[in-house]
Amino acid sequence: LTQVAYIVDVKSAAPLGEFEVIVLLAVLRLDEAAFGSAIREEIQRRSQRRVSRGAVYITLDRLEEKGFLTSRLAAASDARGGRPKRFFTVTATGLRVVRHSIRMLARMQEGLEPLLGDL
Amino acid sequence: MERLLWRALEWWLLRRLPPPAAGPVLGDLLEEYAVKRGGAGPLRASLWLLAESLSIVIAYRPQLRATSSPQRTAMDKLLSDLSNGFRTVTTRPAATMAIVVVLGFGVGLVSAMFALADPFVLDPLPYARPGELSTITISVKHGPEPRALPSLADWQARTDLFTEVATYKINQPIRLTLPDGSVALSTASVSDRFFAVLGIPTNVGRDWERSAAGSEVPLILTPSAPRSIRDQDQAIGRAILQQEGGTLRVAGQLPSPFVFPGPGSATPIGGLTPLANEPLVVVRAVAGRVASSRSLPVLARLRPGVTSQMVGTALSSHADDGSGFIVGAESLHAQMTRRVRLLAWGAVTAGVLILIVCAANVGNLLVVRVVYRTREFAARQALGASRWDVFRLVLAEICVLAILGVAAGLALCAATLASCAGILPREFAALGEPSLTNRVVAFACSAGGAVILFGLLPALVAWRATPAALFAQVAPTDTKLVGALRFTLASIQSALAVILLVGATLLGRSYVNLLSQDPGFSSSSLVVSVSYPSRVVGAQLQSQIDGTLRKLRDLPGVQRVAASHGTMIDDLRSMGLVRFDGETRFVDRKAVTPSYFETTGSAILAGRAFTDRDGPRSACIVNESFVRVHNKGMSPLGLAVTVAGSPVEIVGLVRDTYDMALDERPTPTMFVPLQNPTAGFRISYVLSSGAERPSDAAIERAVAVASPEAIVVDGSTIRERLMRSVRDRSFATLILGLFALAALGVSVAGLTGIVMYTVARRTREIAIRVAIGAGSPAIRYLVMREAVAAAAVGGILGLTASVWLSRLLENLLYGIRPADPWSIAIAAIAVIGIVGVAAWLPARRAVRLAPTAALRID
């Protein structure tokens, strides 16, 4: 029954783009410290590519809208001009869709090792 | 400014982002901005903030479009205008390219000149609170010996004037032995409060005090020290053997940037050693009267409220009997930038003139562009756009062009700075290599902004367009305003081009005067300056000089060799007092070997050259200036000059030579035979050779064999040294010449544009005139008169201004007066000729128009 529920859940969710998967993984990696700048920094550091700040923020908003992320506002500080910090957490659904996306990629890759080499 | 930018971005982002996202995003930006600002400075951080905000707004744009109301904010309008402007400039790539190139040219050149001048004009010196630093010089009056001389300790106690006082002495280069060979190092000895005066942290390396053993001298390396010493691992604490006998131990390294605070700072000082207890002033008196004096320069940090002038007045000693000393004080900035400041301001002024010429040209091009779009503006108004909308549209387009022009200008500026590094006078690099700093970028942006002011004129033309223009037979309307604008802009260009051309002609003729001047030397002779350790003097130095002369004479290709004490064609001179004709005279003294005059090609006009039997106390030779100034032009042969109480017979008269600089008139000079020099200084060896010149390596080997401790400081021909002595003049001439040509080119392009525009606008009229029998001269007059009149008005204004402005160049002129009529005439003829050709070529097209052309114009 759990398996069926999972399949229904994942199938009903909108498919994830590559960048969305990357953002979700970055939020998972940062755990409690996942906010806009830190997430972008983590992605740039690990992917070795420059990422637009706007793309990160809009993707975070979209993922929250889809129900894969939740956010909470931390207290404002003077260093931030009295603006709060917005921390993100991956929801259970978010975790499942990331897992699904990665598995899907792994299955697609099966048998292509001679072409793709050892990744 | 930063606060204003932040407030503007905050306002913008709050309106472009959904409310839940906006606050945290702004917080993230502000937090990261503070970090960036600390690392990269406010300008770069602000640019970063702008770019990041833009990236966020672009990302949220589709979402905003889907949700926002149709009501547009002012920022929306501005962005939309800029976007329209960008689209418009890309639809006319050729015209856009022309404007961007001219604008980039002007902005690039003026920014490059600003980058050169900035360190000398605006930049504070790289020391703590540089405004408090002053440099003090002491000169002892000639007369009775002063009873008391100033000392550093006395001045240190003057707490009413100074907070810190220090002195320094530039040393001869020394040779250091390293594990992988030897290296020459220029050093200065500095007193113990030197670093405190400059405000440089003293925790560099180990203690500055001499080591307890007393045998080792601590050495602090500056960033100018040879890499082989600086880059050695663990250089600090490592002993370096000095070949002269003593041992130096590297005690510390100064952080970059460091500029040695002296007038000779163009010579990079690689190391600093402690100054032994040397008196501030040394006076040599003969029979109770001052014969010569030497003093060390003093660096002082003035107490707040104390000026350099107050220091000079407070410390000078004016005894009633005429003895005493004079203390001169000036700000350290003034002293270090004196030689370059005028040149720097001149370069910036020339750059600004070029910018105005380019801006006027751009203004002209934009007027044409707007006039051709009159119908479009009329159509927009007919469809409901207000005049303000049309004005804004043109202004946005001009802003886009200005942004592109500034970008092109910055690229040109960077390329100019990179390519002119080799031709810059070395004084320009004294405070650091000129580079594209934040301030230069800001200056370029301001220059671009200034050009927008010229862009307001064409925007005004657009403002006056009315829907009636849609029905006009010929598109361009409002010709009176357009004509007046174009005429004024073309006149401004011509006037400035003439001013630059007159300046360039004056400098060019002055430079030709310099080059055509006979220096009195054989320019091809090679001069090798050799520095000896200070302890090598007297007979020991004489024997090394003789040995070096022998070795140099044996080199293949060398015909004659000679030596002189001191430097040749350099700023340094050895002066002293002698008595002649019953009076005390101030003369240059130069000790030379007997073959000096023959080797350098200096002509003996009367009497004889030195022989081996002559000594410094028995014979001397004087130059023409000596005779002219001190002997009323009469023959000096057989007369005697009294040096330190001993009469020395004048045995020869030699021609004047320019042995200081090509632009410095010869002064009264007395030559004496070089024998057992008592002071360790530089010796200049002069080599006259045939076609085959000995290599630098062979010369260095020859010097090293005869005197292993000597250092070859410079090896160059007399011609090279003479050219080097007027390098600042060559630079000024080159810059002004290039700028004048550039201004003339831009101005000619503008005038050609006027004629081409006239031909295009009046094609139908011209064709009809041709059809009814108008001749070529009449047609040519019709199309050329506007351009020629603009050039004439501009030319007259330019020439009038030149007569007054050329006085500013007075210090750079040589053998020519500022308002030299020939130079002005040459410039005027050149302008008339070039303008004539520029207007005549496009006029040919009008003359060749067939009457049928009238039918093809709508």
Image (cartoon, coloured by chain):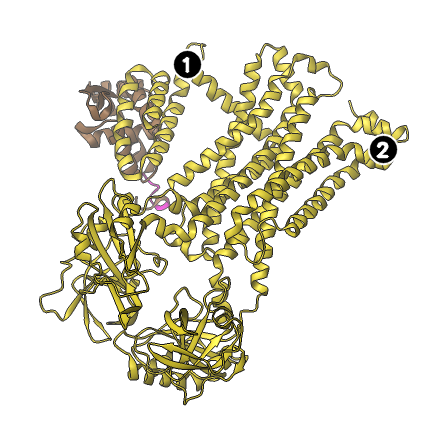
Chain colours: A brown, B yellow
Task: Locate residue B588 relative to residue B208 in the image: left or right.
Answer: right
Give the quadrant of the N terminus of chain B: top left
Residue bearing the label numbered 1 = B66
Front residue of A97 and B742: B742
Q: Chain of mark 1?
A: B
Q: Which of the 4 image quarters holds residue B580?
A: bottom left
In the image, what residue occupies the spot 68% across and 35% down? Answer: B793
Q: Is residue B742 left or right of residue B679?
A: right
Magenta span contains residue B561: no
Question: Does the magenta portion include A114?
Answer: yes
Q: Give B842 or B497, whichever is nearer the viewer.
A: B497
Task: Identify the element where label 1 is drawn.
Answer: helix
Per the model, the C-alpha gap separating discs 1 and 2 is: 59 Å
Residue, disc 2 = B850
**Amino acid type, callout 2:** Ala
Q: In the rendered view of the protein, which quadrant contains the C terminus of chain B? A: top right
How many numbered circles are shown? 2
Residue A88, image x, y percentages = 22, 23
Give the magenta range: A110-115
